[in-house]
Amino acid sequence: MAKVKKTKGELKAQRGALRRYHRFLPTLELKKRQLQREVRHAELMWREHAAREAALVESMRPWVKLLSSWPDLAAYVRLEHLDLESANIAGVTVPTLAGVRFAEPAIDYFATPPWLEDAVVALCELIAVRAEQLVLLRQRELLAEELRITSQRVNLLEKVMIVRAEENIRVIRIALGDASTAAVARAKLAKSKIAELRSGVAGE
């Protein structure tokens, strides 16, 4: 750490810096709280979709073995496009899933088993839920990273920069006080010597 100058100019600069730190700190703390809420929300949404995925898988369990007997299933369940957008959450740009588009399956109801239509609907829903989970996971990662950076900044301001500025101000004020006291003492000494000289000259 650079040695602080013990001058009035430096004292003014340190006081100005301390005021700026105190003004900026509440803004950073507010952003930190917002990010904490958004990270928790993204985590909650991800867990909800994970539970929905588990429920879908469980509902498919009675007939899931039938899928292995139908080798051309991929022809009926084909993801065409993920509609991704972006949103600003607490100052962070994150992806959002606007929609999932599947190719319209051409099912020949006379040549396919009766359970195929339900299987296609269930599998499309499962894919959509998993796509949403991936997007939510990315949201959580981006928000968590911004929270980490913001928390570091809050700690830097609160525990380093503000403490350092306060200590610098204390040291400078003591130094200026000592210098002022020494200057007064020198002035008195000089005044006393001048008085002695004058009295000596007058005595002659």
Image: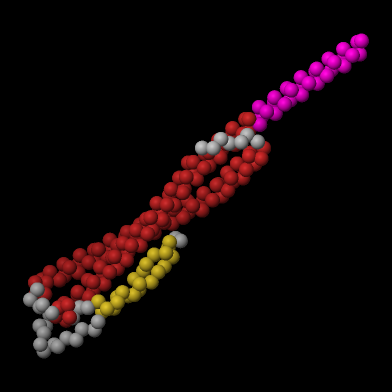
- 178 up-or-down from 46: above or below: above
* Range covered by the magenta-colored residues: 176-204
Name the residue: 38% across, 55% down.
Answer: 145
Q: In the image, is 17 to the left or to the right of 54?
A: right
In the image, 29: left or right of 136? right
Horizontal arrangement in the rendering, residue 103 relative to residue 110 (left or right): right
Which residue is rendered at x = 74% and y = 25% of the image?
184
Magenta span: predominant SS is: helix
Residue 197 spot, x, y in % from top left: 85, 15
> Would you say residue 37 sits in the magenta stretch?
no
Percent across and percent down for residue 121 are 20, 78
Task: Choose between 9 and 64: the one closer to the eye.
Answer: 9
Give the left or right position of residue 145, taking residue 194 as reference: left
Query: In this view of the protein, can residue 164 be seen by the observer?
Result: yes
Residue 66 position by quadrant:
bottom left
23 vs 136: above or below: above
Q: Residue at x 49, y 41 (%)?
A: 160
Residue 118 visible somewhere in the drawing: no
| Whole-percent x, y for residue 162 in the image | 53, 42
**Magenta stretch containing residue 192, yes or no?**
yes
